[in-house]
Each structure stands twice: as structure tokens, then as C-alpha cells.
Amino acid sequence: MAKDTYYFQHDFSPLDDPKLLALVGECGAAGYGIYWRIVEMLHSEDEHKLRHEKYIMLALAKQMGTSVEQIEQVLNTAINVCKLFDSDGEFFWSERVFRNVGKMEALAEKRRKAGIASAKARKTGKTGTGVEHVLTSVQQNPTKENKIKENKRNINTDIKEKNIKKKNDFDFKSELRKIGISDGTAEQWLKVRKAKKAVNTEIAFKMIAIEMGKVPGATTEEMAQVAVSRSWTGFRAEWYENAIDTQDCKNKGHPAGKEDNITQMMRQAGIYADYHKKNNF
């Protein structure tokens, strides 16, 4: 594994990429989450490649809370159908990751040269405009700790600026619809998030998609309906499972003809019977 790991740039609207959109169409929200986890792993590897080995699949399955079969399905689709990764049969990699790494290495080289120029200027007692320009345009970060602090400051600044902008660069509702959530449910969820002052960022959407991918036997629409009924701003797989378990326990104790709010909501949406049929209730 790489000795130092830092953040890498993430697109504002990755699902505008037809390759990634195709992956979501084939593998659902789980495919989206698994793809980004693989990208993260590729960035942290020394050679920025991963082997086609069982232990890699097992590690990914453990981290994502899913099966090895699903990891292999997503990876094979990403390589052979969507062309998001390249492979020679022994390793697989991403040209996107190589480009990101190239940018980071170029920035590191600029900082190295700026440090040398600064040291020479201090040694000779000369501070020409050329050195001043280099030091101004390329900030030095002598330690990993300082790099991490600077990265965090940059991320926080970017998030604040995006929240202040009147024009929203990320269409949260559109991305919810792309992973199978209906327009009406997406609109209701946005109202819940707005009431609780949740910010509709790409990061927030990504976390929702990843967590939804961990729930077997349920559609994203079903999960979003429950989130709306419970007034959740986000989504966690364990929240959903607990909500369904609670609902089932209540249903067993209800007199005939009485239902709890979640059951009524699911029945009205036409998903209650489908959900119970899928789960053999």
C-alpha cells in the first residue's frame, strides 16, 4: 500500500458520464458505491493497480457489506461492458486514476522546486521577484500533517462556497431519480431534508447510494419511501432494517384492519405486497 494517502478530486456530476450511468443501470446503487470504493483503493496502491485475486474481492465484499459474487459482477461489468477499468487478466486499473496521480505528482514537483528556490534565496540573502512569485503560487507543505490540514481546509472552503452559490451545481433530485427513485418520492424527500436544513451535496448523495446498496431484496424506491415516512435526511442500511423489523412486529400484534403508518404508506404506494412477497412474509 502507498505510504501517504491524500484526497483526490471528485466530479460534481459523475452520473453525467454515460459509462458510469450504464454501470448504475446494470448494477444499481450498489454498483455506484462499489465503483468509487475501487477507485479509492487504486489511488492508495503504489502502482495504482489491483490484482484479479480472491482476497481483493473478499476485502471489498467485507467493506461494502455485500457478497463476493456481487463485487465480481460489478467489476466485470465495469471492465467488459462500461469500460470504466482496463485489465490485462492479471491486474486491473483506471486511466482516470493515472491522470489524478499525474496531477498530484506535478504539484509535488512544483512544491519541491519552490522549496529549493526559497532555500537558495535565504542562503544568498536575495529575494528576487521570481522567487517571490514561485513561493506565492506554490505553497510549501513540509510535513504530511500540514498537507492533511491544508486539504481539510480546502475541502471545507469548497463546501461552504458551493452552499452559498445560488446556482446549484449538483442536482440532488435528478441523481435520486437516476438510481430508481420516483419523482414524487424524491420531491418528498427533498422537503424533509430542507425542513431539517440538510445540504444537498454530491457527497451526501453518494453516502445514501452506498448505504442503499447494502440492503438486499429491496428497491431504492422502497427504501426512499421508508426514509420519507420516518423523516430521515439521510439513509443507513441498519436504519432501514430496524424500521422494517419494527413494522413487522407491530403488524403481528395489530387487530385486523389496523395498520401502522409505514404499512399504510407502503400499501398506498403499491409496494407493500411486493416487499412481503420478496421476503417470504
Image: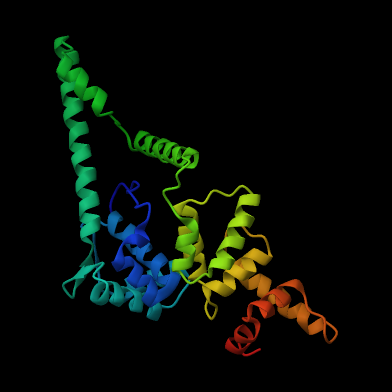
The image quadrant that residue 150 belongs to is top left
Classify 18 as above or below 159.
Answer: below
Q: Is residue 46 visible?
A: no
Q: Quadrant of the C terminus?
A: bottom right
Residue 91, given in percent of the width and then of the height, sits at: 20, 69
Identify the residue shown where x is 75% and y is 72%.
Answer: 261
**Which residue of the protein is positioned furthest toward the right in this rendering?**
255
Picture quarter with the N terminus: bottom left
What colouring method underlies this structural image?
A: rainbow
- Residue at 27% over, 29% down: 140
Q: Is residue 185 visible?
A: yes
Looking at the image, residue 28 sits to the left or right of residue 212; the answer is left
Q: Nearer the viewer, residue 58 or 205?
A: 205
Marker count (numbered): 0
Q: Quadrant of residue 29?
A: bottom left
Tell me: residue 129, above or below residue 227.
above
Horizontal side, residue 272 vs residue 206: left or right: right
| Residue at image coords 75%, 79% | 249
Q: Is residue 18 left or right of residue 231?
A: left
Can you give x and y, in whole percent of width and height, for residue 34 in the image? 39, 67
Residue 244 left/right relative to 9? right
Q: Which of the two residues, 224 or 177, is positioned nearer the viewer here? A: 177
**What residue do we see at 16% from left, 25% from top?**
116
Question: Residue 44, position in %: x, y?
Answer: 30, 55
Image position, residue 230 (x, y; %) = 68, 64
